[in-house]
Image (cartoon, grey):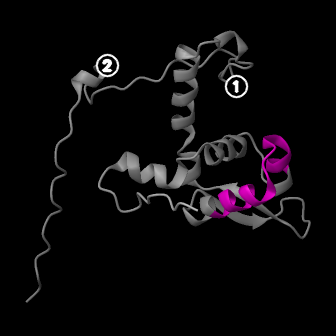
Amino acid sequence: MVKRTSFEGDACPIARSLEAIGDWWSLLIIREALFGLRRFGEFQSKLGMAKNILSTRLRALVDHGILTMAPASDGSPYEEYVLTPKGRGVFPVLVALRQWSEEFDDRPSEIATILVDREKGRPVKKLELRAEDGRLLAPADTTLKPRPAPPRRRSAG
């Protein structure tokens, strides 16, 4: 078995995020959790995953603080998987992936759903990257620069 590279300590934030959510099963589990699934059997049934793969992915999502375990909401002796704020923070990433697919998929007519605002029932506007002053940014309008060093603490004494 080939051990995959870990990006946990990588300096790139994209690589670091892929360590936690970079495989398709994890993203699909998070998608389903955002839509309200909480039980192992619900995830297994909805996604059609092998139980061993689902168990491994759920454990990793808990270890990364994306899901947490909580007593079952129906009072049964089971536990449920609940999204943490960190897990809910993946929502815009999933929306960006969805919108990218809707724009560039070879067969967009086969996409079965559209994402709508629950209150108004209208399609969600395309995500946009904007500068602090509100300007719309394209890739050519951005660059990377070193992160400023944190302020040095003065020693008492």
Disc number lying in front (2 or 1):
2
Report which quarter residue 122 is drawn in.
top right
Pick out the residue farthest to the bottom: 157
Magenta stretch prevailing secondary structure? helix
Tell me if residue 67 comes above or below residue 90 in the rendering: below
- Which badge, 2 or 1, comes first in the chain's sequence? 1
Residue at mark 1: 118
x, y (%) of residue 34? 68, 42
Is 74 positioned to the left or the right of 119 in the image?
Answer: right
Is 69 positioned to the left or the right of 153 in the image?
Answer: right
Secondary element under disc 2, as helix, strand or loop, is: loop
Determine the residue positioned at 31% across, 19% down.
136
Span of residues in magenta: 42-59
Determine the residue positioned at 50% across, 19% down.
126
Q: What amino acid is at disc 1? A: Arg
x, y (%) of residue 66? 58, 56
x, y (%) of residue 86? 53, 53
Mark 2 and mark 1: Cα distance apart in space: 26 Å
Report which quarter residue 142 is drawn in.
top left
Is 50 positioned to the left or the right of 93 in the image?
Answer: right
Is 27 positioned to the left or the right of 6 in the image?
Answer: right
Residue at mark 2: 136
